[in-house]
Each structure stands twice: as structure tokens, then as C-alpha cells.
Image: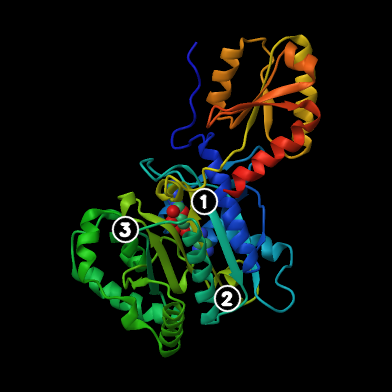
Amino acid sequence: MTTIRAVRGMKDILPPESHRWQWVETQAREVFALYGYREMRLPLLERTELFARSIGVDTDIVAKEMYTFLDRHGDSVTLRPEATAQVVRAFLENHLEKGAGVKKFFLIGPMFRYERPQKGRYRQFHQINCEALGSDAPELDAEVILMLWDLLKRLELRNIQLLINSLGCPECQVDFKARLKIFLFSREGWCPDCRRRREVNPMRVLDCKSQTCKELLKDAPVLKDSLCQTCNRHYSQVLGLLTRFGVDFQEQPRLVRGLDYYTRTAFEVTAPQLGAQDAVAGGGRYNGLVRELGGPDLPGLGFAIGEDRLMEVLPAEVGRGGDQRIFLAALGLAAREKGLALLQELRSAGLAAEMDFDDRSLKAQMSLADRLGAKWVIILGERELAAGEAVVRDMATGSQQPVPLKELKTQISHKVSAKEGN
Ligand code: HAM
């Protein structure tokens, strides 16, 4: 019989790699806590209209990439392609907008987009997502970016770039769209999608992936020239704060992002070593989104880190974890029984310990311990048992010493803390 394979574009995250994922998420949780963000855990399925209304019907995500289906009741539901819309949905549904102050949330989990799978692009991928709702202050833009930067620095990422732009407010965008439309109609050769988009949603042309369109866009107008005075000031203040706090950024006047809800600050973090899919994180302001989803006129901004891509650029030595594992090699039935009790004692002291129950030779158990990456092996045979002791072997140095069973827990704990202290 043939074995069953995972669905195309979806992958298993297995040990020891899964340990690095856990480590990254722990770092993220610690950094977010410092900035006052709290976790939301939301359903993977949402009503389809949530994404159509927020991300925009002309975006690639909504037009081509959503996992949408009818449930058994006949309702149209969609596996979330991103988290911002659903964070806002949950925020409004649970009346979290009440009270003063900026409301800050993070969400970690899988997203789904039916894209053509390739390196760095999956159909199920994972995001670390942050959203701050309730203020339009440029300090908040700077703080959100600083938080992202803090996290990426903690993860020791190298060769990353922060690209930034301002997409202006709806008024700036009216002016920009008009200028862009004139440009788009003055050239020929656009792909069929862009020929339609230049009529209904010209800004989406700027995000087209077709090589010909990208080429044609080189002379397109830039948003910066359409910014109103207030948006201009907001943008300069954000850039000024980033400079003051030592964040190295690069202005990218053609950055528009692939979702319709953005206003003002928009940014991406890229890692050129990733090749074609080089965006590790993306985000920005969405001052009209809460209202668009039926809520009050509340500004917001946030970002999402693509965790799968992040793992690709995480330095190899980072997040591996110094597992201080202990293996107990028992020889004979009586030693096995005593061994099990000793393991429970070690575990109760917070020490990771395991043994094999299959009556293998000492040699076989030693090579098993080696394969498991054990730092210490406790050898317990009939002779040791009779003497009330065990032999403790340090796998790194090969040195062995007898230890009375009564002192095993304390002595091993000391050895572990001594290694951790190194
Ligand atoms: P996005 O740019 O669509 O933004 O996605 C953010 C990140 O998710 C990308 O930079 C990339 O690293 C990762 N990503 C996206 N699609 C894939 C894929 N198919 N395979 C692997 N990784 C992928 C958003 O989703 C916005 N909701 C971000 C945001 C939050 N804006 C404001 N708040």
C-alpha cells in the first residue's frame, strides 16, 4: 500500500527544528510582554466576507488565494489568510475597544494562502502577528517598529533591511490614484489583471508580480509626491524617531504592500539572502479598517513576521538549546525497577531523564544514549544495586564515578547547574 503524503505546500515541523521554533516564539512573547502586548488565540476559520471586506476584493489574496468553502450548513467560510482582519473582528465582537489607551495584541499561528508553492512560499505558513489599536500618534508607529527591531536583534538576524514608505490618507490616495491612472493609461503592455485593475483599483497594479508590469512601473509616480501636509509631517516624525533610536531604515517610495487596508506608514523587513521571497515581515497602519468592519473610527497599526522565512535566516547556532539530558542504563530486572523510581525522582527535580525498557546490552544502551544526545549516563547493574550506588558517566569527557543512590539527585543537579553556568 502506498503511504499518504502531506498536502502540497504544507510541511511538517519536526524535532530538532521544532525546538528552534519554540525558542523563537518564547523570545517573541518576552519582547511583546515588555511592550504591553497580550495574546489573542483566534479560530482558523472565519466568515468569508470578513476578508473580502478588509483585505480588498482586488488583491491577489482575496481574488486567487483563499481556501474558501461551504460548510455543511451552506455558509461560506475561509481558512484565515492573515490575522489583522480577524484581530479587529474579535476586538469589536468582544467590545475590547472600550476604555482609554492603546489596545495591544499579539497572535501566533498558521495562515493559509493557495499560492504556487516554492522556496519560502507555502500554502500553510506561520505568522507572529502584532496589532496596536487606538492611536494615530507617530510615536506608536515608531514603537511598533522598534519592538519588531528589538525582537529581530534578539534573534541575531543578520543582513536584514527595513524598507519604509507612507501610503498617505484616503485624500492623498485620491490624488495619487488619479496621477497613477493617467500614467497607467499612457503605457501599453500591462498584464490582463492590471488592465482591469488600472480602471477599478490602480494602486494594486503597483503590487503586480508580472515581470513586464514591474518593468513598466519603473517610471510610475510615487506616493510621496501626493502626501498632504498632515501625512507628510506624520511620516517625517516617524522617520525622525526611528533615526533617533538608531533603527537603520531605507525609504522605499514604491512600497505599497499586498493588502488594501493600509494608510500612512507601511514597512517591510527583507533578507536578500532569501532570494525571490525575501520579505521576512511586513506591516503598517490601517486607520480605516476598524470602521470598515463596522466599528468606531479607531486608527491602528501592526505587523506580521513570516515565521517559516524567519527560520531560514536564523543563524544556525541560535536557539538550539543546551538540552541537559540524562540517560539511565539499567541492566537486569531489579535494576530496571529501581531505575524507573530514580527517573521519577530526577524528573521531580526538573531534570530531563529517560531510559530504555528493552533489556539491551550496556553497549547498545550507551550508543542509544549517544544518539539521544545525553550529557550524562547513569549506569545501574546488579553489582551497583547491591552496593547502593550507580556509576555516573560524563559523555563529553568519558570520565566515570560511583555515586551513592541517595545522593544521585543532588549530585546530578549540581553537575547540570555547573554546565548551565558555563
Ligand atoms: P503580509 O505581507 O501578507 O502581511 O504577510 C506578512 C509576512 O508573512 C510576509 O512578509 C511573509 O514573511 C509571510 N508570508 C506571507 N505569505 C506567505 C507564504 N505563502 N509562505 C510563507 N510566508 C508567507 C500580512 O499578513 C498583514 N496582516 C501584516 C500586518 C499586520 N499588517 C498590519 N498588521
Write down the residue under mark 2: 299
In the image, farthest residue toward the bottom = 229
Q: SS of the residue at dot 2?
A: loop
Q: Is residue 251 above or below residue 361?
A: below
Query: Of the residues shown, which amino acid type is indicated by label 1?
Result: Pro
Query: Gap between marks 1 and 2, in whole Å?
Result: 22 Å
Q: Quadrant of residue 407?
A: top right
Query: Of the residues shown, which amino acid type is indicated by label 3?
Result: Cys
| Residue mark closest to the camera, 2 vs 3 | 2
Q: Is residue 88 visible?
A: no
Query: Of the residues shown, which amino acid type is indicated by label 2?
Result: Pro
Residue drawn at x 61%, y 63% as measured from the top left: 32
> First in sequence: mark 1 or mark 3?
1
Bin the neighbour count of mark 1 within 10 Å (Cα to Cα): few under 14, some 14-19, many 20 and up.
many
Residue 396 x %, y %: 53, 32
Do callouts 1 and 3 mark residues in contact (Cβ within 8 Å)? no
Write down the residue under mark 1: 81
Write down the residue under mark 3: 208
User: Is residue 36 or residue 87 the one in the foreground?
Assistant: 36
The response on whether ligand 1 sits within 8 Å of label 1 is yes
Residue drawn at x 74%, y 74% as measured from the top left: 98
Q: Quadrant of residue 69?
A: top right
